Image: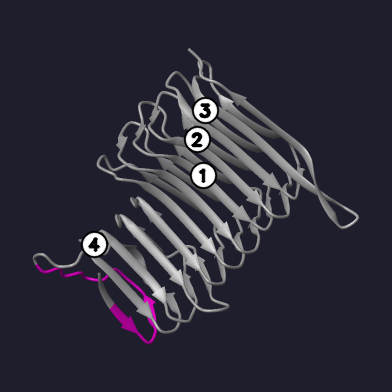
Amino acid sequence: MAVFKFFGLRLTGNPKISIAEGGATKLGLISVGDITSGPPGGRLTFTGLDSLLLATQNGSITLTSDLAFENIPTLSLYARGAGSTLTFDATVSSSTNLVLLSEGNIQFNDAFSLTERNPGNGAALNAYFDAAGNLVANNGLSITLDSSMGDLAGNSSVTLTTGGNLTVNGDSALSLTIANNDGGQIGGNATIGVNAGAILASSLLGQINNLGGTIAGKSTISFTVGGALTTSLGDATFEILQDTVPIDAAINVSAGSFNIGGSLIAMIGGAEAAFDTANVTIDAEERHHGRERPFGRRERERRPQH
């Protein structure tokens, strides 16, 4: 990786990238202080790179909606330092790996919608967001990893981790989807994983759609919530859709409590579902006189079908 360090960094347009024959195709731009954006903005392609890192030594990152990151296979942002915030309102398209890290909060002011698609020779599709503080989306948060109609050699994974709470404001939902339907093939695992102190959203969807597809590894949806999992308006849905090709599938959801505005749905199956193993576990804990005890645990295992 070629790395350049600045006292401060402001992104206002697409840079010209010059790569010598055999030169590095991974670039890191590091700011001692904050990273910000400004007009005119526009499309940022960083032509010729397969990986771009934007990071601070001790500062926040604030990128506004006038920026659009395009055709950068691996895009990583890291707001480093106590109290730092990663505010990300730029759009991302034609990337296969998006990593957002903050030692403070991660915040989306606008509606955040990410779709990663298998480019045809993709080793993996990944979206990884990790905030030491809170993760807040003020107008909906939607992530879709689409490997349908193509072969994916490695894993497909969505991971959201917060040291604080995960809050999705507005009427738009928290929606996390791995789409491997219509002839899709994932050579590794399909995983949706969320770990938060509490979750609040109008509604929630965690879905792995493998109808008409093949997953070589395991299919897993895991939500671990220390406090309340709350949907203010609609359902909380966790589902692995599966048909004729047997897979190992598991849904594990645990929370301190569930406050669901609609229905709580957890399902593994399809019209002609077949499994090696399939397990659904919903686990809540409630406090009684300062003690915690299991409440409402449900578990089912399905053995191979022929």
- The residue drawn where x is 56% and y is 28% is 278
Residue bearing mark 2:
208
Local packing at callout 4 (Cα closer than 10 Å; few below 14, some 14-19, many 20+) is some
Can residue 172 be seen by looking at this rendering? no
**Side of 96 where 166 appears, left or right:** right
Residue drawn at x 53%, y 26% is 277
Label 3 and label 2: CA atoms lie apart by 6 Å
Between the residue at mark 4 and the residue at mark 2, the CA separation in whole angstroms equals 31 Å
- How far apart marks 1 and 4 lie (CA) works out to 28 Å
In the foreground, 281 or 150: 281
Instruction: Write down the quadrant of residue 282 in the picture.
Output: top right
Specify the principal SS of the magenta part.
Answer: loop
Residue identifier under label 3: 241
> Which residue: 52% across, 28% down?
241
Q: Position of residue 185 (x, y in %)?
A: 35, 32
Work out whether 250 lies above or below 46.
above
